[in-house]
């Protein structure tokens, strides 16, 4: 805690059950994902609880960079799932699907290697020249090698 950073809370703007936040103060946190320390700033907290109206007991567990990553992951996962349901894809859509799959696999958001292998085979057939196809092949090959080594 950094007491000199204190700013007063306005309970009338907060969403709370029993105790509102009477004040905000910069606090040191450790990111749940990358374990790096970061500061959850008093001004940021006021924005969360008085402008966005998050429940006052909500805590910030991700550093700013991991928060951005997790938003990108959610967005790409949604697009990936939508395209995965389509039976016909244009080459551009297949490229986007391949890129999303690679990104999501690297970030641990997709783990089904068989399903990714099928996508890779399809990409090799339909868009063999695409740089993303090569990247997906490499990522899957590395993952297999890592599994064998373990
Ligand atoms: Zn982080």
Image (cartoon, grey):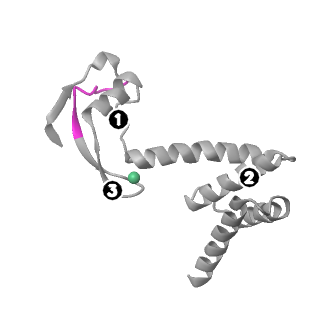
Q: Nearer the viewer, mark 3 or mark 2?
A: 2
Residue extending furthest toward the front: 129
Q: Which mark is residue 81?
A: none
Residue extending furthest toward the left: 4
The N terminus lies in quadrant: top left
The C terminus lies in quadrant: bottom right
Q: Of callouts 1 and 2, which one flags the residue occurring earlier in the amino acid sequence?
A: 1
User: In the figure, 2 relative to 112: above or below?
Assistant: above
Label 3 beta carbon within 8 A of ligand 1: yes
Q: Which mark is residue 57?
A: 1
Residue for point 84% across, 59% down: 126
Q: Which residue is mark 3?
A: 36
Q: Can residue 17 be seen here?
A: no
Q: Nearer the viewer, mark 1 or mark 2?
A: 2
Q: Which residues are magenta?
A: 15-26
What percent of the width, then of the height, locates residue 53?
40, 24
What percent of the width, then of the height, locates residue 136?
68, 64
Q: Can residue 8 be seen here?
A: yes
Residue for point 60% across, 56% down: 103
Q: Of callouts 3 and 2, which one flags the residue occurring earlier in the amino acid sequence?
A: 3
* Number of other residues with Cα within 10 Å of mark 2, as a class: few under 14, some 14 to 19, many 20 or more: some
Q: Is residue 83 rendered to the left or right of residue 13?
A: right
Q: Is residue 65 rendered to the left or right of residue 118?
A: left
Label 1, label 3: how far apart the Cα atoms are: 22 Å
* Number of other residues with Cα within 10 Å of mark 1, as a class: few under 14, some 14 to 19, many 20 or more: few
Residue for point 60% across, 42% down: 75
* Number of other residues with Cα within 10 Å of mark 3, as a class: few under 14, some 14 to 19, many 20 or more: few
Q: Which residue is mark 2?
A: 95
């Amino acid at each position: 805690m950094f007491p000199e950073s204190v700013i007063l809370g306005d309970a009338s703007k907060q969403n709370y059950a029993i105790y509102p936040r009477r004040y905000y103060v910069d606090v040191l946190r450790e990111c749940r994902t990358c374990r790096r320390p970061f500061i959850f700033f008093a001004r940021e907290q006021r924005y969360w609880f008085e402008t966005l109206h998050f429940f006052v007991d909500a805590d910030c567990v991700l550093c700013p960079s991991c928060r951005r990553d997790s938003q990108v992951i959610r967005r790409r996962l949604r697009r990936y799932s939508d395209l995965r349901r389509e039976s016909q894809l244009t080459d551009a859509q297949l490229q986007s699907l391949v890129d999303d799959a690679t990104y999501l696999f690297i970030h641990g958001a997709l783990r089904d290697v068989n399903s990714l292998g099928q996508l890779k085979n399809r990409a090799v057939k339909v868009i063999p020249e695409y740089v993303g196809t090569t990247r997906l092949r490499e990522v899957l090959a590395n993952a297999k090698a890592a599994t064998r080594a373990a």
